[in-house]
Amino acid sequence: MDIRQNYTGMNPKTAVLAVGFDADERTRLIRRYLRRQGIEWIPVEMPAFVQPLGFLAGAAGFSGVNAVNLQGSIPEEMMVMAGFSDAQLDGFLAYFRENGIPGVPLKAVLTPVNAHWNALQLYEALKEEARMMP
């Protein structure tokens, strides 16, 4: 099954929502790969942490919220892959392995469920999932 079937009606941009990445060589390599694949890199910084991920990804039916981030920060790298086909996702993850690029432990694919979450909620869910892994 193609993961894009999960996006029925949402139609997000094909993009990576990127939280907490430094402007270093590793990030430059990741961004260069994405640019060559026609995939947008969208940095998400603290003021936007309260916005729905679907809104940040440009998905249909999502709008921004009028809120101020008083909830906290995200002290680690996190990425959300939006609008990727199975082949794009496989290729992106393979790029890390094949080029010896350290991975991003906190990553997710945008879904109809998490599209309604903000970055802080996704961060907490991914951290909880990581804690439950052996």
Image (cartoon, helix red, strand yellow):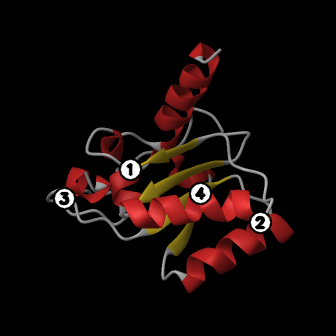
Contact (CB < 8 A) between labels 1 and 3? Answer: no
The reply to whether residue 6 is visible in this rendering is: yes
- In the rendered structure, which amino acid carries the disc numbered 4? Leu
Q: Where is residue 108 in the image (x, y as percent from the top left)?
A: 49, 44
Whether residue 109 is situated above or below residue 37 in the rendered picture: above
Instruction: List x then y, in percent, for residue 98.
Output: 72, 63
**Mark number for residue 93?**
4
Residue drawn at the location 67% of the way across and 40% of the way down: 105
Residue under the point 24% across and 50% down: 6
Residue of label 3: 61
Residue, disc 2: 99
Is the residue 38 above or below the residue 44 in the image?
below
Mark 1 vs mark 3: in front: 1
* Mark 2 crowd level (few <14, some 14–19, many ≥20, 10 Å Cα): few
Q: Residue at x 34, y 66 (%)?
A: 58
Question: What amino acid does circle 1 point to?
Answer: Leu
Image marks 3 and 4: residues in contact by CB distance under 8 Å: no
Name which residue type carries label 3.
Gly
**Mark closer to the chain start, 1 or 3:** 3
